Amino acid sequence: MSFYSHSDLSDTIIALSTPPGVGALGVIRLSGTDSISIADQVFLGKDLMKQKSHTVHYGLIKDGDRTIDEVMLSIFRTPKSFTKDNMVEITCHGSPYILQEVIRLFQSKGVRLAKAGEFTMRAFLNGRIDLSQAEAVADLIASENASAHTMAIQQMRGGFSKQISELRQQLINFASLIELELDFGEEDVEFADRSQLLNLIGEIKRIIRQLIQSFQLGNAMKNGVQTVIAGRPNAGKSTLLNALLNEDRALVSDIPGTTRDTIEELINIDGIPFRFIDTAGIREARDTIEAMGVEKTMEKLEKSALTIFLFDVSSCSPEQLKSDLKDFIKIDNPLVLVGNKIDDTEVNYQSLFAEWDEMIFISSKDQTNIEKLKNTLKSKILDDEINTGGTIVSNARHHEALLRSMQSLDEVSKGLDLQISGELLALDIRQALHYLGEISGEVSTDDLLGNIFSKFCIGK
């Protein structure tokens, strides 16, 4: 059974669109062909049926002779509304009792409670927005930092959708010519110029490759750049976490091996969220608990987007550093080498570790060069940003569809090189069109839509 049935979409629906709980105001939203006429039955004020779209009216919500609340009521007439259906938004006082009573009153008039995401679902099905824009609505609501907000706004305005649609249309144009060739199979004619198609496929693959590469940045901006602070015991990892946070979050001790478990904290650096993870010191474990901590550190390293390898400049030699990096850091992700405790040594550490050009020297205790470290971490992420005309992919479903599109386009390229038949070529192009269409919703299933919209909040 699908998440939505077609009969559902003809109903008038209602939901509270502001968070539940006591507040100054609460907004109740209705959508459906009959929403304005039903609202007119319980609204004492102007005749709503005679009012223009995008107008706001003062009045009372009445249940017979009983006044429930004094409200402001907004009218949005089809097709100029969020759902492209008639819509009504009622701003009430924020008492949970009042809001419940208003919703109950509309239910008694035949209005149905909306399902999760049903308003946005109607906007998609009515052609107001495409599927990627609908998902951006959820991302916008969930955005917790400037970067996530900017990406959601850009996607909601259709920048990503437009780019995918243009690529898909160019493919459709060639696919139609190849399909036409199949109708004239016995006459051995070619309507589609194979060299032009090869150039087009190359250009589309270039753009898709950039979009795929942008996902690492987009996902990081949305969910936080997972950054592991690793190093030997007593290198100052917990002190560094506290310095980055500018508060005493992690337990600090001179005793090596104090940290036995991981500690995670989210820090915003100029709009980019970093999820810093303080880990157990890396060394040969002396007991079972410490061994478990080291094992967990290695697991975190494998999943990290960035790694800070911290060492004590007052006690670590270049040879030991090389050995540690060789033995423990077996990852391909960006690595930032940080020499700590420069306040605690008279050694010329810059000369001693001169072979590492990009090494940063800090004092976590005195917070020396902490801002420099933050800027370096930010640049490690932003330097990977690919120029995609302002488009950054942050949605895992879109990323997966782009990967599948690329695989299909690779098959098209191989087919052109091997001069395979138009029938097989058309099959590979159809596959690429299918995956690109999944992004915007031009190709969709009830299960896919149900999975996406069921994660929305009620009232959106």
Image (spheres, grey):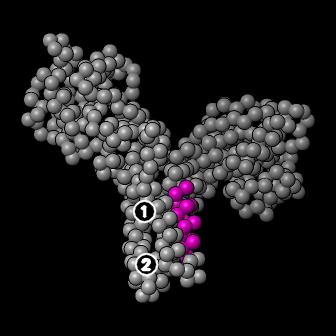
The dot on residue 182 is 2
Question: Image quadrant of residue 458?
Answer: top left
Label 1 environment density (alpha carbons within 10 Å; few <14, some 14–19, many ≥20): some
Question: Image quadrant of residue 216?
Answer: bottom right
Look at the image and give the residue range highlighted in magenta. 400-413
Rendered position, 450 above or below 424: above
Q: Is residue 55 left or right of residue 210?
A: left
* Depth check, front residue: 433 or 248: 433
Q: Is residue 19 left or right of residue 214?
A: left
Q: Which residue is mark 1?
A: 164
Q: Contact (CB < 8 A) between labels 1 and 2?
A: no
Residue at figure coordinates x 38%, y 33% from the top left: 115
Query: In this rendering, does residue 339 appear at all?
Result: yes
Three-letter amino acid code of the residue under disc 2: Leu
Percent position (x, y) of residue 54? 18, 40
Q: CA distance from mark 1 to mark 2?
A: 27 Å
Label 2 environment density (alpha carbons within 10 Å; few <14, some 14–19, many ≥20): some
Rendered position, 75 above or below 351: above
Residue at figure coordinates x 43%, y 40% from the top left: 2
Query: In this rendering, does residue 308 appear at all?
Result: no
Rendered position, 389 above or below 186: above
Q: Is residue 425 magenta?
A: no
Q: Is residue 410 magenta?
A: yes
Task: Say which quadrant the N terminus sits in.
Answer: top left
